[in-house]
Image (cartoon, helix red, strand yellow):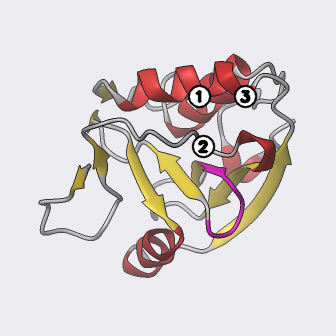
């Protein structure tokens, strides 16, 4: 179940209860969108299932990770005046490992520490738990490729 009680621009919903359905890690993408004016590095989200699938990210300095479906993702882009810069497919050899890590991260609060513990490291944690070695070297999504 999800609930978004914030009156500000939409950032997604909090997953208060796990879903019985597993996410489609056979179609996993890393999404890079433009950042705020003060953030030249942009912002990174995880997408499972491709277009029409699920989107996950951390968007607060201290708060729970958020999820969105396709319509929520489009709303998020519009309300924050963001543009999708890049969508990169990532091979996940161990979907169960990625699912466990995502479930774990969605269930607890996230504290954002600029570069070492940010939106990119959230995505990296999930894909690496799924057996992928892809990631960023500098944790600056708009300036480097997720490889």
Q: Nearer the viewer, residue 32 or 140?
A: 32
Judge the density around disc 3: few (<14), some (14-19), many (≥20) Cα neighbours within 10 Å: many
Label 2 or label 1, whichever comes before in sequence order: 2
The CA span between labels 1 and 3 is 6 Å
For this view, does 61 lie left or right of residue 8? right
Residue that label 2 marks: 23
Please tell me in which quadrant of the rendered image residue 18 appears: top left
Judge the density around disc 1: few (<14), some (14-19), many (≥20) Cα neighbours within 10 Å: some
Residue 118, position as x, y percentages in the image:
49, 33
The CA span between labels 2 and 1 is 7 Å
Label 2 or label 3, whichever comes before in sequence order: 2
Residue 64 circle label: none
Span colored in magenta: 46-52
Residue 1, position as x, y percentages in the image:
26, 49
Residue that label 1 marks: 99
Judge the density around disc 2: few (<14), some (14-19), many (≥20) Cα neighbours within 10 Å: some
Against 55, is 57 above or below? above
The reply to whether callout 2 and callout 1 are in contact (CB within 8 Å) is yes
Residue that label 3 marks: 95
Residue occupying the point 50% across, 77% down:
74
Against 80, is 110 above or below? above
Against 65, is 76 above or below? below
Please tell me in which quadrant of the rendered image residue 125 appears: top right
Q: Considering the numbered disc 3 on the image, is that residue within a helix, a strand or a loop?
A: helix
Inspect the magenta stretch and tell me whether residue 49 lies in it.
yes
Residue occupying the point 30% across, 68% down:
10
Q: Considering the numbered disc 1 on the image, is that residue within a helix, a strand or a loop?
A: helix
The CA span between labels 2 and 3 is 9 Å
The reply to whether callout 1 and callout 3 are in contact (CB within 8 Å) is yes
Q: Considering the numbered disc 2 on the image, is that residue within a helix, a strand or a loop?
A: loop
């Amino acid at each position: 179940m999800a609930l978004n009680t914030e009156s500000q621009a939409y950032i997604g919903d909090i997953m208060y209860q796990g879903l019985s359905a597993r996410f489609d890690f056979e179609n996993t993408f890393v999404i890079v969108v433009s950042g705020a004016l003060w953030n030249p590095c942009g912002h990174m989200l995880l997408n499972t299932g491709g277009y029409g699938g699920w989107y996950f990210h951390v968007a607060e300095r201290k708060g729970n990770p958020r999820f969105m479906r396709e319509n929520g993702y489009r709303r998020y882009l519009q309300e924050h005046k963001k543009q999708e810069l890049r969508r990169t497919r990532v091979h996940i050899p161990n979907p169960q490992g990625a699912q466990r890590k995502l479930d774990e991260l969605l269930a607890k609060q996230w504290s954002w520490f600029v570069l070492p513990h940010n939106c990119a490291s959230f995505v990296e944690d999930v894909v690496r738990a799924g057996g992928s070695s892809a990631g960023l070297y500098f944790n600056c999504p708009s300036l480097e490729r997720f490889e």
